Image (tube, rainbow, N blue to C red):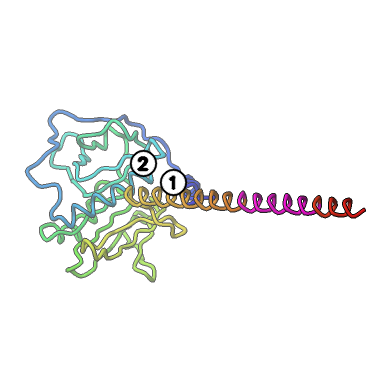
Amino acid sequence: MNTLNDFEIKQRKYIPVFPKANGKPTIYIEGYPCEDDEPMAATAFHGLQINILFDQFFRYFAINELIHIGVDSFIYYEEGDITKCVAPDIYIVFGVEKYPLRRSFYTWAEGTVPVAVIEFLSDSTAHQDRTKKVELYLKDIGVQEYFIHQPEMKKPAEFLGWQRNPSGNIVEIEPDADSGLFSKALNLWLRWEDDQTTHVRLLRPYLPDGTPISTSMEIKHMFEQEKSLREEEQVLREEEQHRREEAEAKVSELEAEIERLREQVANTKDERV
């Protein structure tokens, strides 16, 4: 079994099972702004981190048409009040159709709320991300899990997560020995690693068994490597076939020479007689 096929089997095994939401896909509701004057990413560090993690989630959850992944778009969570609005860096919603794409996400229209929200810390929002937003996401909106992460390597590492326990209370998610946090909602491990090339402290998702979820670029490289291996194997097979044919030709030549010598010896005997 090759690596890609093996991953697809695990993918179907580990993706959570959930019911379809009771709402319907809603692209836009008049009167609810879907844009503001703020840039999409606070820094290039945040932009790269958001793009890479979105790519990983999008590729992993692509096999289920009832999973929506939002990136820095508005979530309106109370009908009739445009101030009840947040714009997390990344959020994941189960039970709603992936398409059409939304300009904003309206919880009452879709019939559900995100299961997980991830914010990447920036100087302007870090305090709110660590404090106010914990209760806002988990209590007011009803999100199951909320995570914050510092993507800039020059700043101290900070990766925290919270969830609601069965009693409804907010509890911090306990890290493992490697500072990873397990998302029960997504059934995935979240871990960070320092990328020395980009100087970004990348947050990455892993399957429950530790298998990393690759980016599209990594998948492309895997395909290229597998293609290269197949081509090398083909070359080796052709070389082996060529060597075999040469050996068979030499054997045939030797057999022919032996037969010629036998005939020569036989003729010599006949002449003597």
Residue that protrudes farthest toward the right in the picture: 273
**Residue designated by label 1:** 16
* Amino acid beneath label 2: Phe
* Residues at discs 2 and 1 in contact (Cβ within 8 Å): yes
Answer above or below: position of 130 versus 103. Answer: below
Which picture quadrant has residue 135? bottom left
Segment tinted magenta in the rendering: 245-262
Dot 1 falls on a residue whose secondary structure is loop
**Residue designated by label 2:** 94
Which picture quadrant has residue 194? bottom left
Which of 9 and 75 lies nearest the eye of the viewer? 9
Which of 251 and 25 lies nearest the eye of the viewer? 251
Q: How many marks?
A: 2
Residue 14 at x, y = what percent?
46, 49
Residue at horizontal 29%, vertical 42%?
A: 69
* Amino acid beneath label 1: Pro
Q: Main secondary structure of the magenta part?
A: helix
Residue at horizontal 38%, vertical 36%?
A: 66
Residue 205 at x, y = what percent?
35, 55
Dot 1 crowding, Cα within 10 Å, few <14, some 14–19, many 20+: some
Residue 173 on the magenta segment: no
Residue that protrudes farthest toward the front in the picture: 272
Residue 137 at x, y = what percent?
25, 50
Answer above or below: position of 41 versus 111. Answer: below
Give how far apart the Cα atoms at labels 2 and 1 are. 9 Å
Which of 183 and 271 lies nearest the eye of the viewer? 271
